[in-house]
Amino acid sequence: MSLNSNQNSQIPGAKRVGPESTYKMTHGVSPLLLFLLLFSVYGSSHGCLRDTNSAYRFTGAVCRLTYPAAVVLNEKTTKVIEAAFQYARYPDVKGEKSMPLLGKISYGLENMEIHNLTIGQSSFQLLPGEGIAMEISNVSAVFIGTLHYEYGSWLVNVAQSIHFEIESQIDLGINPKLYCGQGKVAADTSSCHLNFDKLRLHLQGEREPNWLKKIFTDFVTLTVKLVIKGQICKEINKVANILADFIQERAEQFLSDGDITVDIGVTTAPTVTAHYIESYHKGLTKYNNTSSVIRDSVFNPSQLTENRMLYFWISDQVLNPMMAAAHQDGRFRLNITGAELIELFKLNVTTAMPDFLRKCLVETSHPELRVWSSSVPYINTSTFGTTVWAEASGQLWCESQETLFFKTFITADVTVSYVNKHVSLHGKSLQADVLRAELYQSPLGAQAQLDFIQEALMKIGIPKVLSVLETEITRLLDKQGLYLFDIYTPEVLPLDGFVIIQMDFGFPHHLLVDFLKMTLQQTGGLQQ
């Protein structure tokens, strides 16, 4: 079976996890908000198209990061650069040189470490068609270690091991080039240069060495410059790769739940302008060795503006297959029991409650309502909102005896908002058509009973499901750490066949801490 993008599909839904009046909506409930954490996402699939316009047809999701957002991220980049400096493993340096009077000098610098690191300031600019230009200025650091040297001549013969200290002041330039590598966004950081405003080597703490040591330290300093420059640029490239893996892992965790995953590999290389960086992603749902397909996406860059910091463009062709997979996985189930069920039916319903329902709610000790999706739902996004068509079935149990079975076809226009770190779903234009209803395994005879079921579905059932979805989507996003972001005035804009999520944000400190911990572990700066 194929998860085609034009199939009816469904958002992951409810799954019973406990007795009595408990319920739980499973992960992956709302694809509309799943992309909120993705600042730069990486996929595992291979192959990118060179022609960007052709790649649009296969694009299910787009991320646009504008210049103001890049400013926020640049403020955190200095912390990453600090990690590259601080925990780089500097190789031992060995060499020899012939000098007048001293003869041949053999030397070695070992156990080099960095201390008292400070970074003055950093700046950047977006280079259209290329990548990012970053300048880190006034990096002050002290390198310490051990120096072994020996030399001999007819005048003197010396072999010694002493501590050394190197004072440095460095300006660093990095020009990452963004490209598409093996189906993911990649950065080439080979364009890396260091300028030394100051580099002084002191032996055994001496600030004013004698003329002999000064000759020696001068030529050793030149060698140290090359070592530091090569190792720092190497470590920056290593940290960039760790960052790529870190982001990929977080994105995969955020979009995966059980057997349902999403291929967010890129369809083409990112676009870089003076005002934004934009990446294009497949957004293909994978479930049970099947994958959805997108071949006729309606994306066009003109659909996005540059007024907000971050934009996500998400096609219905991404959302529908995700819902189809969730339906096939049995996710969309909700059980309500006991006092919670009784309280629900106290809501205002104008049609008289049938006697069988009244007896079930009042005279039994454990009434239970079980509801589930009985066919694959389908959504369509337009400027009016997201229209959902769904077929649902339900059973009413009284004293462990099935009392009522019904099947209904539901239509609802739903809009989404995110206010005060809480998801809100607003339903309007609700409609519920009862396709089938049986009481004690015999058809319901009275039209009044059917009218009650229909009205109860519209006034009680659909609002209850939306309420559960609100709570569980919020819980899911909190679990993923979205509440740690400072998100300002987020908007979810439904348009014809796609939705745009736009916002301003502040970068969460916890993500930086987690990343730096991983960097320390992988570079050996922190014991694992």
Image: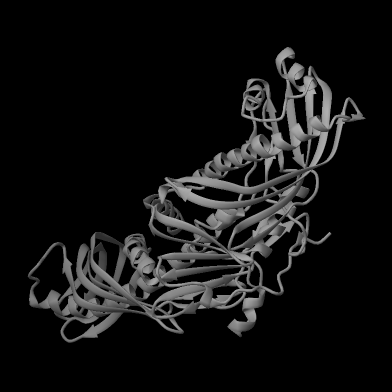
Is residue 524 in view from this perspective?
no
Is residue 330 in view from this perspective?
yes
Whole-percent x and y of residue 503?
A: 43, 60
Does residue 281 appear left or right of residue 233 in this picture?
right
Does residue 502 appear left or right of residue 23 in this picture?
left
Whole-percent x and y of residue 90?
A: 35, 66
Give the answer, above or below, for where 429 lies relative to 201. Answer: above
Give the answer, above or below, for where 404 lies relative to 229. Answer: above
Q: Residue furthest right?
A: 442
Q: Quadrant of the N terminus?
A: bottom right
Number of dots carrying numbers = 0
Residue beneath the point at 72% across and 58% down: 321
Does residue 75 appear left or right of residue 36 in this picture?
left
Does residue 52 appear left or right of residue 102 in this picture?
right
Residue beneath the point at 59% across and 59% down: 384
Q: Quadrant of residue 451?
A: top right
Whole-percent x and y of residue 458?
A: 68, 39
Q: Nearer the viewer, residue 50 or 447?
A: 447
Q: Nearer the viewer, residue 103 or 34?
A: 34
Q: Quadrant of residue 372?
A: top right
Q: Nearer the viewer, residue 494 or 165?
A: 494
Whole-percent x and y of residue 247?
A: 51, 60
Colouring:
one colour
Q: Nearer the viewer, residue 111 or 63?
A: 63
